[in-house]
Amino acid sequence: MLEAFFTPQSVAVIGAAREPGKLGYGVLSNILQYGYSGKVYPINPKADEILGLKCYPTVLDVPGPVELVVIVIPNKFVPQVMEECGKKGVKGAIIISAGFRETGMEGIKLERQVLDIAKHYGMRIVGPNCLGVISTHTPLNASFAAGMPPKGGIAFMSQSGALCTAILDWALAEGTGFSYFVSLGNKADVNEVDLL
């Protein structure tokens, strides 16, 4: 059920950016840099090419199937993008964007809207407001973490992006390996029980 997050055949980064330092650049760069072998599609209506890959205005413009999306755009655009993902047949969405339940009433409404769209299309969501997902054995680094831990037998998950970052920094310094690394964020859909 959650294979789309760990062993997808194709990944689209919605909000891929050309400028180093932006989250959309960091996520796309991590996917490419750490050896993911599936198809990668940057989505940005204002770019033709990012990091040597052809860019598409929306996920609906991608010629082939898209199994997983990583969403790094302002929160108000996420429902429209989720609708497009549903129509495209996307199975999993990692929503890194913040500005949802953690911000109060308006954010709660927005998060519910996004979850309703996902349920309607049978999509699963990690996040929103999270660091992302890493699978070292695939390998896939669909996060904005500053590095990739070595392969190992430990799977780690946390609601807290700050704790994830601290553990990753420690793991990189110590050479400690992980199998999976998941930042859950707001847990609108996928939670600890699903992952266990």
Image (cartoon, rainbow, N blue to C red):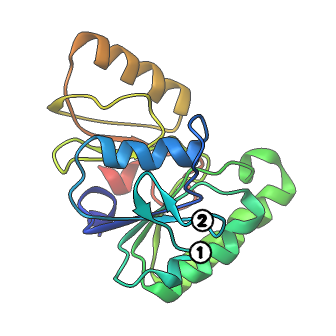
Asked if 158 appears above or below 80 in the picture, the reply is above
- Element type at marker 1? loop
The answer to whether mark 1 and mark 2 are in CB contact below 8 A is: yes
**Viewer can see residue 185:** no
- Which structural element holds mark 2? loop
Most extreme residue toward the top, as rendered?
A: 174
Side (left or right) of 194 relative to 159: left
| Residue plotted at (43% across, 28% down) | 146
Q: Where is residue 59 in the image (x, y as percent from the top left)?
A: 51, 77
- Numbered label tally: 2
Residue 70 seen anywhere in this rendered image of the structure:
yes
Amino acid beneath label 2: Asn
Residue behind mark 2:
44
**Category of crowding for the residue at label 2, using alpha-carbon neighbours closer than 10 angstroms: few (below 14), some (14–19), many (at least 20):** many
- Residue 18 location (% of width, % of height): 57, 49
Please give the residue where the numbered disc 1 appears in the rendered image: 57
> Taking 191 as reference, is 141 above or below it?
above
Query: Marks 1/2: CA distance?
Result: 5 Å
Q: Callout 1, which amino acid?
A: Pro
Residue drawn where x is 85% and y is 59% of the image: 106
Give residue 3's quadrant in the image. Answer: bottom left
Q: In this view, does 145 lie to the left or right of 118?
A: left
Q: Is residue 183 left or right of residue 128?
A: left
